[in-house]
Image: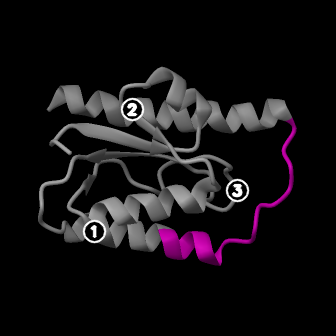
Amino acid sequence: MSTQCYILTNNPLVSAKYPQMAKHIGHGVGAVLQAARDEIHLGAILINHPLSGSIGIGETPCKSLLLRGRRGALDMASLKLIESALEAFRQAPPGSRELPPDIARDFQVIDLDLLDCAVKTLSAR
């Protein structure tokens, strides 16, 4: 994998807006966090904070994370962030209730907006 940026997400709006960058992880927020941790262990760098926004990690049904491609060395700052997010996710009450479609879409829109902000910072660098 090159040093290009890419997205791990379970949000269909993100996958649709960024089809060239997004890798869809279809098993919930925990799976996205785990996949990001795996990528970080392989040398990827986390660009956006996994606990961004004011919605608790156990409350949102979707999560999108922007990473910079593998560079070979383990980035300890990224590892600490993702491990902290995973711990917060494990401690959060399970969010197993089914959301009405309009509320689920609201969460998707919020996640997309947060990701858009992270993507915009790339062009400002």
Residue matched to label 3: 59
Q: Main secondary structure of the magenta part?
A: loop
How many marks on residues?
Answer: 3
Residue named by callout 1: 41
Front residue of this view, candidates 41 and 123: 41
For the residues labelled 2 and 3, the Cα–Cα distance comes to: 21 Å
Q: Residues within 10 Å of mark 1 (few under 14, many from 20)?
A: some
Q: Are marks 1 and 3 in contact (CB under 8 Å)?
A: no
Amino acid residing under circle 1 = His
Front residue of 104/8: it is: 8
Q: Quadrant of the C terminus?
A: top left
Residue lying farthest to the top in this orientation = 17
Element carrying mark 2: helix
Q: CA distance from mark 2 to mark 1?
A: 25 Å
Give SS at disc 1: helix
- Residue 103 position in % (x across, y down): 79, 36
**Magenta stretch in the rendered image:** 86-100
Residue 9 at x, y percent in the picture: 50, 43
Q: Position of residue 11 (x, y in %)?
A: 59, 38
> Is 5 placed above or below 38 here?
above
94 inside magenta stretch? yes
The amino acid marked with disc number 2 is: Cys
Looking at numbered disc 3 in the image, what kind of residue is underneath it?
Glu
Separation (CA) of disc 1 from disc 3: 27 Å
Q: State the residue position of label 2.
A: 117
- Displayed quadrant of residue 31: bottom right
Residue in view at x 87 percent, y 38 percent: 100
**Residue located 20% across and 45% down the image:** 1
